Image: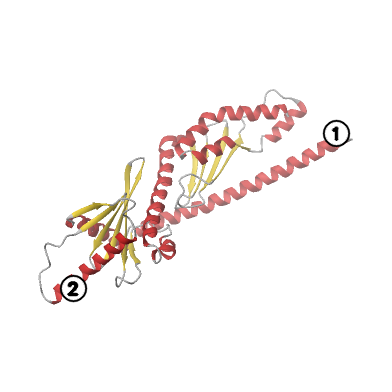
Amino acid sequence: MEQYAEQIRRRQHSVSELTYIRDDDTRLETTRARLSNVLKRHEDLKERLSRDSDKLIFERLQREFEAARTAQTEEILIDDEQWNDGLLATIREKVHMEADRKTTANQANVPADAQFQSRSYRIKNKVIYCLDGARIGIQYETFFAGEPCEIYHCVLESKSFLEKMTVIEHTLPFFLPIREVESDFLSSNAIKFIDHLEEILQSYIDRREQVRLIKELYGNQIGELFHSLSYNLIEFVMEDFECKVTVSIRYSDLLLTLPSQARVLAWPLGSFQRTSVTGRRARSAAAAQLVPFRLPYAEDALKTLSLPEAFAEIVLSLPRALKQILSSQESD
C-alpha cells in the first residue's frame, strides 16, 4: 500500500513538473514572438532613421566634426587626472569667448583673427571639440577586440558660461538612454555625463559584437537567435547536438559586458535514449526525457567568459555533461 502511494505521489509530481515546463515553454514562445515584433519594428525604425532629416543631421554632424578636426592647430592629450571640472570649465569659457569675438568682428565688419588657435582635447577614446556657436562637441570612438567600430557624436550647448549645458544634437543609437543620463548628470556633473555616455556606448558595442562573432563563428550550430535593441537580453538555441540547448542571458545594467543572469536548458531529443533500463524504469525514463535539464556549468561560463568563449566551452563540455546527467538518472 505504501509503495502504491509512493508511486501516486511520484506520478503527481511528474505531471505537475511537466505542466510547469509546458507553461515555461509557452512563456518562452510568447517572449520570442514579442522579440520578433520588436526586431521588425527595429528594422523599420532603422530604415526611417537612415532617411530624410535624421540622415541629414548625421551627415551634417560628421562634416562639422571633420571640419573642426581639419581646422584645429593642436590636439592636446589629456590624462585621467587632467580630465576634471577645471578643464571643462576652461573649454566652456573658450567656446563662449570665441563666439563673442566672432559676433563682435561680424558687427564691426572686421576680418576674423587668422591666428586664433583652435584646439581639441583627447581623453582616451573621446575627443572634445570647440564648435562654432558656443557649442562643445564630443566625438566618441568605439572599439572591439582592438579594432575600431563606429564613431558617435554629441553636441552640448549653453546660452552663457554660467548656465547649464544641454544636449542639442547627437548621433547615438536612439534606444540608448541619453536623455535619462542627461537628466541625471549633465547639470550637476558634466564630466560624469560625458564619461557615462562613453561607457554605455562601448558596452553596447561590446555586447553587439559578441553576438555578431558567435553568429560568424558558430552560425551553423545556432537555430534561432533573438536580442533586444541594446543587446541587454539575448536568447538563442543551440542545435546539431544530442539535445536542443536553449540559452537565455540578461544584463541588469547597460554598462555590463558579462551577463548578470544566465539560464541554459538542455531539451532531450528522440535520439537521447536510455538503453540500459527496462520495464518500469524505462517508462519512468521516457517520462523524464520530456523534462529539460539545467546546465550549471554552461551558466557559469556565460557569466564569467565572453559570449564566443562561453559558447566554445559549452560545446566542448556538453557531451560529458549529458553523460553525467544520464548516469545520474540511471542511478536513481
The Cα–Cα distance between marks 1 and 2, rounded to whole angstroms, is: 95 Å
Q: Residue 306's x, y, as percent?
A: 46, 39
Residue under circle 1? 3
Q: Is residue 271 visible?
A: no
Q: Residue 179's x, y, as percent?
A: 41, 63
Q: Residue 19's x, y, as percent?
A: 70, 45
Classed neighbour count for the residue bearing mark 2: other residues with Cα under 10 Å, few (<14), some (14–19), many (≥20): some
Which numbered disc, 1 or 2, marks the residue that appears first in the sequence?
1
Q: Residue 31's x, y, as percent?
A: 56, 51
Query: Seen from this angle, which residue lies furthest right?
Result: 1
318 to 178, vertically: above or below? above
Q: Is mark 1 on a helix, strand or loop?
A: helix
Q: Which of 44 and 214 is in front in this view?
A: 214
Residue under circle 2? 103
Q: Nearer the viewer, residue 328 or 85?
A: 85
Residue 93 sits in quarter:
bottom left
Q: Residue at x 46, y 48 (%)?
A: 256
For badge 1, the amino acid type reads Gln
